[in-house]
Image (cartoon, rainbow, N blue to C red):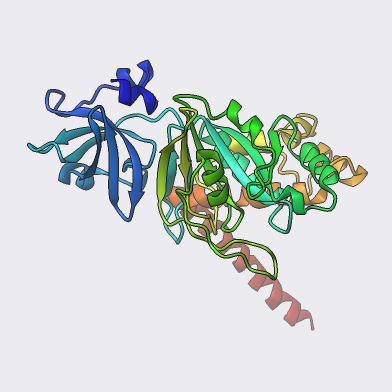
């Protein structure tokens, strides 16, 4: 089990015993995924695996299928060169997003991670509102978020930017780095410890591949050319893959995210907007929506300037996303919402007829 231990096998994992074929299965960790093809790490080494027919058939949604970082139960082929995934073991944490498109399902980006690095840059990519979305997703998945502000050497007012980030995200570790120059990477060793799993998240072109190469100490990720107009790298990572580092830590690299739609992230949103949650305790009404209700402490803070308008607007936006997600997952809620809007439209038509009659 020494190799498995190096990849994070713990007593918690050992307790997640497979319920299918216990005599013929072995534990393994998914270390790579690309277009439905998986590589898994077993006690004997790495091999190619695929889903068993039963697992593929019985999975009710994509989130029940393996993701990089998952521990799974495998059945090996007679030559031990290939395996079938029988079962995905329970996850202690996960990073997920609402799947792109019209579906209400979630997509697991990485599983069983301890720390999630949100990589942004000190230029136009630095967007506190988008970072709030990342933090909500990470907290909801029971991982620890850490913000890495890359290309800090290109920022004319790095001290001001860091002060802004510190005020916007109290309690969150924030590190200014330059992956290209190798600056500021020392503090990252506190997270990249043996048998600990980290994941890198962020938009395309923020320097995740450069950072990965720096941390590992050799070129394992292909780098894209840099556009002269904005000094941003192009998207190069196309698959999710786990690397074991010289420190013994584990790091999952992911493709750049063009969209980070919220899935079920109620707990994460509460943490990301804890200041608004604290203010709401002083609202006159317990079910206050913080929109136009009298005696709303949130609106009062907005008016006196102690609550930033952009922060408040993003709170309302993400709450609407959550409401929409719930309706998509619950047909009864969706039917109730349609009935409500049908009644509103009927009332508006009646009012228009009455107005025209008065004219």
Taking 287 as reference, is 190 above or below it? above
| Residue farthest toward the right in the current orientation of the protein | 304
Give percent across and percent down for residue 282. 80, 30
- Residue ID at (52%, 44%): 212
Quadrant of the image occupied by residue 191: top right
| Residue farthest toward the front in the current orientation of the protein | 218
Give percent across and percent down for residue 167. 80, 38
Q: Is 49 positioned to the left or the right of 71 in the image?
A: left
Instruction: Using the rendered image of the protein, determine whether residue 173 is visible from the camera's viewpoint.
Output: yes
Q: Quadrant of the N terminus?
A: top left
| Residue farthest toward the left in the current orientation of the protein | 78
Give percent across and percent down for residue 169. 73, 37
Q: Is 41 positioned to the left or the right of 283 in the image?
A: left
Q: Quadrant of the C terminus?
A: bottom right
Q: Is 119 positioned to the left or the right of 291 in the image?
A: left
- Residue ID at (68%, 63%): 231
Q: Is 82 positioned to the left or the right of 311 in the image?
A: left
Instruction: Using the rendered image of the protein, determine whether residue 291 is visible from the camera's viewpoint.
Output: no
Give percent across and percent down for residue 300. 87, 41
Taking 158 as reference, is 92 above or below it? above
Please state which of residues 90 and 298 is positioned toward the viewer in this rendering.
Answer: 90
The mark total stands at 0
- Residue ID at (65%, 32%): 186
- Residue ID at (59%, 29%): 189
């Amino acid at each position: 089990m020494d190799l498995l231990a190096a990849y994070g096998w713990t007593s918690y994992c050992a307790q997640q015993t497979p319920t299918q074929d216990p005599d013929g299965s072995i534990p393994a960790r998914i270390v790579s995924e690309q277009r439905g093809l998986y590589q898994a790490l077993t006690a004997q080494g790495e091999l190619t695996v695929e889903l068993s027919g039963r697992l593929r058939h019985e999975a009710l949604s994509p989130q029940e299928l393996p993701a990089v970082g998952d521990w799974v139960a495998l059945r090996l082929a007679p030559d031990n060169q290939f395996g079938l995934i029988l079962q995905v073991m329970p996850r202690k944490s996960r990073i997920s997003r609402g799947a792109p498109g019209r579906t209400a399902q979630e997509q697991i980006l990485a599983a069983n991670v301890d720390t999630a690095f949100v990589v942004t840059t000190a230029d136009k990519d630095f967007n506190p509102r988008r970072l709030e979305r990342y933090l909500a997703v990470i907290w909801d998945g029971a991982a620890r978020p850490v913000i890495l502000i890359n290309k800090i050497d290109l920022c004319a007012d790095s001290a001001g930017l860091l002060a802004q980030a510190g005020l916007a995200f109290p309690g969150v570790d924030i590190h200014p780095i330059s992956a290209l120059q190798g600056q500021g990477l020392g503090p990252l060793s506190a997270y990249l410890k043996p048998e600990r799993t980290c994941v890198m998240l962020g938009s395309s072109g923020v320097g995740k591949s450069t950072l990965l190469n720096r941390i590992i100490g050799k070129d394992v990720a292909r780098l894209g050319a840099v556009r002269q107009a904005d000094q941003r790298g192009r998207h190069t990572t196309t698959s999710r893959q786990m690397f074991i580092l010289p420190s013994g830590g584990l790091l999952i690299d992911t493709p750049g995210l063009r969209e980070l739609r919220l899935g079920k992230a109620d707990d994460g949103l509460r943490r990301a907007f804890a200041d608004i949650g604290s203010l709401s305790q002083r609202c006159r009404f317990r079910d206050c929506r913080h929109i136009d209700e009298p005696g709303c402490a949130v609106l009062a803070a907005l008016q006196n300037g102690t609550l930033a308008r952009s922060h408040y607007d993003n709170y309302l936006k993400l709450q609407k996303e959550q409401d929409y997600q719930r309706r998509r997952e619950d047909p009864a809620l969706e039917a109730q919402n349609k009935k409500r809007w049908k009644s509103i439209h009927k009332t508006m038509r009646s009012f228009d007829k009455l107005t025209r009659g008065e004219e």
